[in-house]
Amino acid sequence: MATANPIIATASKHDKLRQLGIISLNGMFDEMDAEGVLRQAVEDLLPGDIAMVSSFGADSAVLLHVVSRVDPSVPVYFLETGKHFPETLEYVEMLKSQLGLTNVIALHPDSTDLKRFDPEGTLWENDPDSCCHIRKTEPLEQVLEGFGGWVTGRKRFQTAERGVLPHFELTSDDRIKVNPLAYFTHADIDAYKVAHGLPDHPLYERGYKSIGCAPCTSAVAEGEDPRAGRWRGRDKRECGIHFDFNGSIAKPVSQSSLTLFKDGAFKADPWRVWADDDVVANVRYAHVPLSVFVENRDGFLASPHPVGLLVNPGEKVEDIAQDLGRFSSIAINFPAFTDGRGYSSARLLRERYGYEGELRAVGDVLTDQIPFMRRCGIDAFVVSSAPTRAALEKDALAEVSRYYQPVGSRAEIPAGTRPFLRRNPN
Ligand code: SF4
């Protein structure tokens, strides 16, 4: 049985993982169900050295149930911010008792910090980022160091970036993230709850589909995004307790700081640009310049981490055509309005080489370019221009309705051509 043992991971455990290799580990347990994956982590890979954080919110019961079946003494940390709904605190007790969890540990904010920075308990009203930092991030950071592995409830269906989420990840600080629910779909979650008689959070039926602290959570309407009720009307999306893509606690994100426009909205961007001191074997969620990838191809192909590609003007995508499956995202650089070479790269990737992952435009991305970029298969835009940002937010971009150069399908008929001169689409 695992015990709450906040000891820094021993070298031998991680040596074992390195020897095994995270890739082969994922291969071996790819077909295994959530319980089998977690059992492997808890009993063999990281005994006594793994924990999870749970919000005991609307989606928490499934993973807690899996944990309870593997080992109910695995430490489960609950951020007791002092601002929860009474129903959430009841739910903690309900799940503890129903699932037999014996090691749920409440993490409280530091009382000196509260006295100093939030003596009235109203910091959330005017500075929610600082409130989350004191009540969530800081208490959690203190226990993070103590474990060699963490169980997360992340799932592939949640975001495009998580579409390749494996069961096991090695973070840049040499910790293991275990994602037992990685392959679960929405339907799987619902079916699991029914099959195991798991209770919903008491507020779920009243329209609270994503549940955090009481002052910052409201019910959502039918069809509304489940997270729309979090910090409603405020320029804030995340609470700061999520692990970022490198394994550390993510910083709070404000809506106005988001520059990636994708699927109709500005959203948090997991990708960054490659830095000169990045190490091929460890880098993750970075767009690697095409020339760097070609030089270090073997190393990137051997790495288990998600990597992207940056294509600068004049670089030949033909050079990496055979490796396109390696990239979860490709960024095409448009350094100037007058430089159109990126459009050709995008079309080659989509049309000739069949690349289906995220294709984003970076650089000098302006309003007038976006409709043409979309026609070439670009589906995400990193935008810094304020007018472009406003146009995207209002969905006020013109579509291209007349064109001289067909793209994608040869069924497109260029404007101005005579019917008998049109190419046969077949
Ligand atoms: S969610 Fe709201 S009340 Fe809770 S810690 Fe963050 S700002 Fe404070």
Image: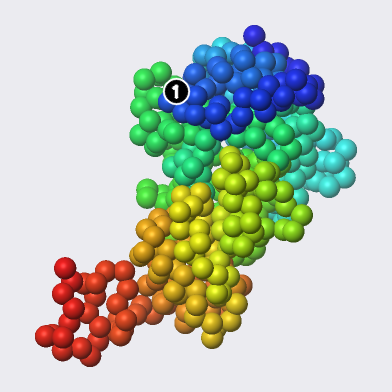
- Would you say 189 lies left or right of 13 here? left
Q: Which residue is drawn at 78% across and 23% down?
A: 11
- Would you say 42 lies left or right of 251 here? left
Where residue 363 appears, as percent x and y from the top left, is 60, 73
- The kind of residue tagged 1 is Asp
Task: Report crowding for label 1: few under 14, some 14 to 19, many 20 or more residues within 10 A (C-alpha).
Answer: some
Q: Is residue 79 visible?
A: yes
Element type at mark 1: loop
Where residue 414 appears, as percent x and y from the top left, is 25, 83
Q: Quadrant of residue 80?
A: top right
Number of numbered discs visible in the structure rendering: 1
Q: Is residue 13 above or below residue 343?
A: above
Q: Residue at x 87, y 45 (%)?
A: 116
Q: Which residue is drawn at 47% across and 64% down?
A: 318
Q: Tell which of 424 and 415 is nearer to you.
A: 424
Where residue 101 appears, as percent x and y from the top left, is 59, 15
Q: Mark 1 points at which residue?
A: 33
- Would you say 371 lies left or right of 166 here? left
Q: Can residue 214 be seen in this view?
A: no
Q: Tell which of 86 and 98 is nearer to you.
A: 98
